[in-house]
Structures are given as C-alpha cells and as structure tokens.
Image: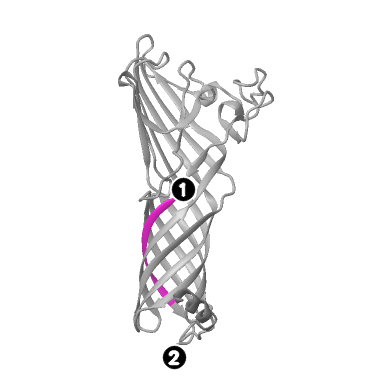
Amino acid sequence: MKHLLLLLLFPIISTAQVSGPRWYIKAGAGFGTKGFLPAGLSPKSLMPSSSSFDIADGTILDMSNSVDSLKQISYVHDTYTKGFNYYLGAGYKLSKYWGFEMGVLWLQGGNITSRNVTDNNPLLGQGSIMDVTTYVRGLAVIPSLTLDVPLNDNWFIQAHAGLTLPVYGKIYHHATIDAQHTFVGPLAAVLDAETEANFALGINGGVGIHRKLGKRFEVFVDLIGQHLNVSGKQMTIVHYDITIQGNTTDQLVSNPGAYHSQINFVDELTAQSNNKLNNANVDESKPKDELLVTSPFSNLGFGIGVLLKLGKTE
C-alpha cells in the first residue's frame, strides 16, 4: 500500500515548484577506496622474461607480492580510483525534489604497489627484487539525476545516480629491479610505461546530507559508490634502462622498433598476430600484440563540498 501511495504521489512531487533559484554550481573534493566493493579484477604489471632483457619477451600479469623460495604468492586486489578526486559541476532543479546535474571529476589516483622476490630466476639471479608502482591520473564526465528529501527548513538528504564517462587519462607504471647475478654481478633496471584506455562507461550513485547556509549557499557530505572497469588500448614503454656493474644501457635504443616499446591489446592471439609466441615472423616496426587486459576502477568513497545557487532569490 505504501508503494502504491508513492506512485500516486509521484506526479505531484515531480511538478512541485522550486522555491528560489533553479541553477547552481558546486565544487568538492573526495577520497575513494576499494571499501566493501570487490575489485573483481586485479591491477596488471609488466613482468620481464626470465631469459631475456628485451621487455617485449616479457608478459603482463596480475600484480602480486611473492617470495619464490617460500612459494608464497599474494595477489594485489585494489582499485585504480582509490585516492583523492576533485569535482566541479553545474545543475538545474527540475522541480522542488528532482534535478539534473553535469559534472567533471579529476582523479588523482593513489599508488598501488607490489614486490616480487625471486630465488630461481636464470636472468636475475638469486634474491632479485622487483618493485612495481602503478597509479592513474584522469578526467571523467558525470551526468546524473538528483532527488532531494527535505528534513526541515535547513537540512535535506540528496540521492543521486548517474553515469561515469572517462574522457582523458592514463595508467602509469614504474618498475625497478635490484639484483646480484652470479655471473654478471650487480644489476639494476628502471622501467616506466603508460597505458591508454579504450572507451568505457560506468555507473555511480550516492547519498548525502546538505545544510543550507542562507538563500544561496549549501554545504554537503556525500557517500558515493561507483562500478567501472576499463580495458587497455595501448601500452607504451617510455623509459627502460639497465645498469650492469655500473654501466647503463638504454634498452629502447638497443632494441629499436615499435615491437620493443609498444603493445596493442587485442581480443585474441592468432597465427597472424604480431607476437613471437604465435608468429615467428613478427614485424618489429609494428607494436606487439597482447591479449586485452582490464583494470578495476570501482570504488566506495566520500566527498565534501559547497554549492552556490545562481539567479534571483525570494
């Protein structure tokens, strides 16, 4: 009966007149974490081959913390949208209760790290350590609908639901290797790579409490959740140096050709793919083909901010 009553009242609620300005702008900042939401997918790491310093012979794997000698592996389950974000938006009140909002969000993603210690790597020797750090910087457009539920003259609850559309950004990867090889001696490597994403579309929603400050200003606190997974389009190796016994070699210069510095992500690998594992006659002037990888961007977080109403007030 209660739900039927709400359905009957919906047309009245939707057409209720706005008291005061309809237009507003708002700004805020927030912090996202994995929270209680499963990431579903693990961040990925570019791992070198155990028999070649050419990074093109390596593989892309789920990030993990591992110790070979103890046979311990702990996978890293985290989201790229953890960390700080900054929001700027504008909205229009369709009625006293309903509204539409368009915003942009800048993500200053936090670091996701892993460490692999190997004792049985033929290339790196015993006790080699590989540290990986990855993070995101990006911009998303967020259109949403809002619903206001008044509590009294100054306080109200606002729920909102909408879409998340990433429009700019990259995933950054930084890896270092510290090894003491039996034959070549001290060995160190530094690798930096960037991943560009395919088109992606997510959903988000939240609920918050607003406090009116006079006729024009409001402050708010929101609890926000998002579901979004982003697949890679292309990875580019931008820096890869190896130092052996104090002598540093730029591996991008030593191994010219796009095959050794760029990766195109594809849905499947075939005998025609530009990948040595499937095709002995690769074209080294073209990027390497690798299976598509998908990264987790879902999160649970909170935000605080201020809202300014525009136009004449009553």
Which of disc 2 and disc 1 is earlier in sequence?
Answer: 1
- Magenta stretch, main secondary structure, is strand
For this rendering, which residue is in front, 89 or 94?
A: 94
Span highlighted in magenta in the image: 298-308
Residue closer to the observer: 128 or 202: 202
- What is the count of numbered marks? 2
Residue depicted at x 45% and y 43%: 40
Q: Residue farthest to the front?
A: 1
| Residue pictured at 42% horizontal, 49% vertical | 81
Up-down relation of residue 233 to residue 150 (above or below): above
Q: Secondary structure at mark 2?
A: loop
The kind of residue tagged 1 is Phe
Task: Using the image as rendered, state which of residue 85 and residue 247 is in the foreground.
Answer: 85
In this view, the residue farthest toward the bottom is 314
Which residue is disc 1 drawn over?
297
Quarter location, residue 197:
top right
Q: Which residue is mark 2?
A: 314
Q: Is residue 300 magenta?
A: yes
The residue at the point 33 percent across, 21 percent down is 71
Residue 278 spot, x, y in % from top left: 63, 21
**Residue placed most toward the observer, 87 or 251:** 87
User: On the image, which quarter does residue 267 sit in?
Assistant: top right
Q: Which residue is rendered at x = 39% and y = 43% of the image? A: 78
